[in-house]
Image: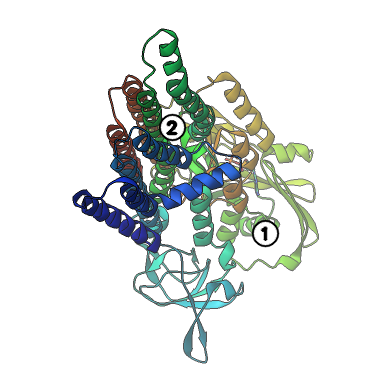
């Protein structure tokens, strides 16, 4: 409990004790009223203050105003009818405060739960100076420094391992429980926990730009993008509160006047009491509190499963996903190519590969990385100049004074060169040197281990169509698609064609059906933004993709998409249950009160009860089971 919550608890206890004591002290008249007003002030002073502030700021119709008006009204009625029943106004305030306290504890707890689950915020970084380890603020570590991570410590900053090996626990980042083994030369992201070895890491990012900081930022700010349900509720409240106040006014004034006109007794106190009770019931706190809490819990629950959702609006969209469009390379396939052959080479095979690797030295495409790895030698960038990358085609560069082009058939045609077609399975990189065809390198990629399973699971959870878009050759695309069970394939697309294809699909689908595009951001960042939901690969994906995307899969496993959809559906389901449940109870109570069948006690019990149930229900969104 925080200090504020403890203080509240004390106020509640003192109020209850004073009420019991006053029950046994036989004071009457003005002294009795004064005594009860003191108790009222103990429990309700902050509500009165907030209500006053609301009026001053020109926004009077909030729950504080309703509570203040109703409880003060109850006092007024007790004085007017000389009943001396001052307990009611205080009790209503008391229960309201108990409800508020409960809710603030529940919200605080689930927020803490989420932060604990996302226990990735590093507190310090170790720097070795003169053989001694020194703990420093990770924000002060410059890019390129060497930091030391010891067994049991969190990796504070992204970097590359320069020395040591260890098993990493990545579960806070990816939801993956199996440890990952790393050694010198491997990249490492912040937020992982080193389980056994000492690692020396050369940092490649600043602390603020590192994975752990980015994720925490995302989760903490997810609430700022409001979903449709949330927007609906605030619109609803804007109409609802004044409407309720008008209805209460009608009950208090119009009904007695009409009765008088008809010759019946006006019965003012009775109708004013009903109107005040009406105000107590009308307060929509269960909705106002539980809906944002459900979304917050949903985003938190998803992040525990390795899926980062950037706002509650995407949670809502995800739950309506009916079309899933995939990029091929790096999304459904691993994006790690092996060279399987070099054909029709005009030079020695190794020399051709060397030219290819050098020409590719500046590209971040998975193909380029794979060619550089296959070449294996040192890349001397001073041998390369005039590099140009044409997305969806390939690269051109000048290597050792020769113009080199490496890419697909489209690139060759663009340069006016006729390539020799290749019949081997795999992606073909055609090469041209000094404007003449120089052979091709065949590379092949393998599907990710869970890709086929993910496509099947998507179908099973109600996705109507899965589509694969790729810039690769039709033959390769068909082969991959058939192996994975994807419904449709479009191949040989340029980045702009991918946008066009997605736009076609968007135009053909229904209003309530959402389309998700899953990509790694290389040659597809525009599509990520264009789709209803852009899902990016977090580990392999480019920074641009993670920036452009709405949802990020921490470990690049396509199966997480299914999880994300399931979590979002559960969360939206909870929101709907809460809306329906609290509105039914609310309107039921309002009717009972207007009919004179419920008093203020019953009203506040129903109100606090509904709120507690709604909050407990909302917290369920945090837990996800297969
Ligand atoms: P995908 O849609 O499968 O992710 P891309 O749109 O990234 O594929 O690339 C499409 C095609 O363009 C590749 O299959 C390759 O033939 C060619 N290409 C793109 N970038 C490069 C590059 N850096 N080097 C060689 N070829 C490239
Ligand atoms: Mg790609």
| Cβ at disc 2 under 8 Å from ligand 2 | no
Q: What element carries label 1?
A: loop
Eyeballing the image, is 263 above or below 162?
above
Q: Tell me what residue is drawn at x 47 percent, y 25 percent.
A: 249
Q: Nearer the viewer, mark 2 or mark 1?
A: 2
Q: Is residue 209 left or right of residue 539?
A: right
Q: Of all residues shown, which one is farthest toward the front?
A: 29
Residue toward you, 432 or 543: 543
Report whether residue 555 is seen: no
Q: Mark 1 points at which residue?
A: 361
Residue toward you, 243 or 557: 243
Task: Tell me where residue 294 appears, x and y as whole percent.
Answer: 40, 41
Q: Tag 2: Cα neighbours inside 10 Å, few (<14), some, or many (≥20)?
A: many
The number of numbered badges drawn on the structure is 2
Q: Name the residue under label 2.
A: 319
Q: Which mark is residue 22?
A: none
CA distance separating discs 2 and 1: 42 Å
Q: Of all residues shown, which one is farthest toward the top?
A: 262
Eyeballing the image, is 506 above or below 42?
above
Q: Tell me what residue is drawn at x 33 percent, y 51 percent.
A: 31
**Which of disc 1 and disc 2 is earlier in sequence?**
2
Task: Tell me where residue 579 appears, x and y as whole percent.
Answer: 39, 30
Q: Is mark 2 on a helix, strand or loop?
A: loop
Q: In this view, does 410 lie to the left or right of 282?
A: right
Q: For residue 500, which quarter of the picture?
A: top right
Residue toward you, 440 or 450: 450
Report whether residue 252 is seen: yes
Q: Of all residues shown, which one is farthest toward the bottom?
A: 130
Q: Quadrant of ligand 1?
A: top right
Eyeballing the image, is 224 above or below 385?
above
Task: Tell me where residue 317 appears, x and y as whole percent.
Answer: 49, 33
């Amino acid at each position: 409990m925080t200090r504020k919550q403890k203080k509240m608890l004390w106020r509640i206890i003192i109020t209850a004790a004073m009420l019991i004591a006053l029950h046994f002290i036989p004071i009457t008249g003005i002294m009795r009223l004064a005594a009860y007003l003191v108790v009222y002030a103990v429990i309700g002073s902050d509500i009165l203050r907030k209500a006053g502030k609301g009026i001053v700021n020109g926004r009077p119709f909030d729950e504080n105003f309703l509570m203040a008006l109703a409880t003060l009204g109850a006092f007024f009625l007790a004085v007017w009818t000389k009943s001396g029943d001052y307990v009611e106004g205080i009790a209503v305030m008391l229960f309201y405060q108990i409800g508020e306290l409960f809710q603030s504890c529940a919200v605080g707890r689930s927020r803490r739960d989420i932060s604990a689950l996302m226990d990735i915020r590093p507190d310090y970084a170790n720097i070795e100076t003169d053989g001694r380890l020194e703990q420093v603020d990770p924000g002060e570590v410059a890019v390129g420094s060497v930091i030391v991570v010891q067994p049991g410590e969190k990796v504070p900053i992204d970097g590359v391992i320069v020395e040591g090996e260890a098993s990493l626990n990545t579960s806070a980042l990816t939801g993956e429980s199996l440890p990952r083994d790393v050694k010198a030369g491997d990249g490492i992201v912040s937020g992982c926990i080193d389980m056994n070895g000492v690692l020396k890491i050369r940092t490649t990012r600043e602390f603020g730009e590192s994975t752990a900081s980015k994720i925490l930022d995302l989760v903490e700010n997810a609430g700022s993008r409001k979903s449709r349900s949330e927007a609906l509720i605030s619109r609803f409240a804007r109409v609802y509160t004044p409407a309720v106040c008008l209805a209460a006014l009608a009950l208090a004034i119009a009904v007695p006047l009409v009765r008088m006109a008809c010759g019946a007794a006006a019965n003012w106190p009775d109708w004013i009491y009903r109107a005040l009770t009406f105000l107590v019931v009308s307060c929509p706190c269960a909705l106002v509190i539980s809906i944002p809490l459900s979304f917050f819990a949903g985003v938190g629950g998803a992040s525990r499963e390795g899926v980062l959702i950037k706002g509650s609006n995407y949670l809502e969209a995800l739950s309506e996903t009916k079309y899933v469009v995939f990029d091929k390379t790096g999304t459904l396939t691993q994006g790690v190519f092996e060279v399987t052959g070099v054909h029709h080479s005009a030079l020695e095979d190794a020399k051709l590969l060397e030219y290819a690797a050098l020409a590719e030295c500046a590209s971040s495409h998975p193909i380029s990385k794979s060619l550089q790895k296959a070449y294996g030698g040192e890349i001397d960038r001073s041998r390369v100049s005039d590099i140009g990358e044409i997305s969806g085609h390939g690269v051109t560069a000048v290597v050792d004074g020769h113009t080199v082009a490496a890419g697909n058939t489209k690139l060759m045609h663009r340069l006016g060169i006729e390539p020799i077609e290749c019949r081997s399975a795999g992606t073909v990189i055609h090469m041209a040197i000094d404007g003449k065809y120089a052979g091709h390198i065949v590379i092949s990629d393998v599907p990710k281990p869970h890709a086929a399973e993910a496509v099947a699971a998507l179908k099973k959870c109600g996705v109507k169509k899965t589509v694969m878009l790729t810039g690769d050759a039709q033959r390769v695309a068909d082969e991959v698609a058939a192996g994975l069970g994807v419904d449709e394939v479009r191949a040989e697309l340029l980045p702009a064609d991918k946008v066009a294809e997605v736009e076609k699909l968007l135009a053909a689908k229904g209003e309530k059906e959402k389309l998700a595009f899953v990509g790694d951001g290389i040659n597809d960042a525009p599509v990520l933004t264009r789709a209803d939901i852009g899902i990016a690969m977090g580990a392999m994906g480019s920074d641009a993709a993670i920036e452009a995307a709405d949802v990020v899969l921490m470990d690049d496993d396509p199966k997480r998409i299914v999880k994300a959809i399931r979590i979002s559906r559960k969360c939206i389901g909870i929101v709907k249950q809460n809306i329906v449940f609290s509105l039914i109870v609310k309107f039921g109570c309002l009717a009972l009160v207007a009919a004179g069948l419920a008093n203020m006690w019953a009203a506040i019990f129903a109100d606090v009860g509904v709120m507690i149930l709604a909050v407990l229900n909302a917290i369920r969104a945090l837990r996800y089971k297969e």
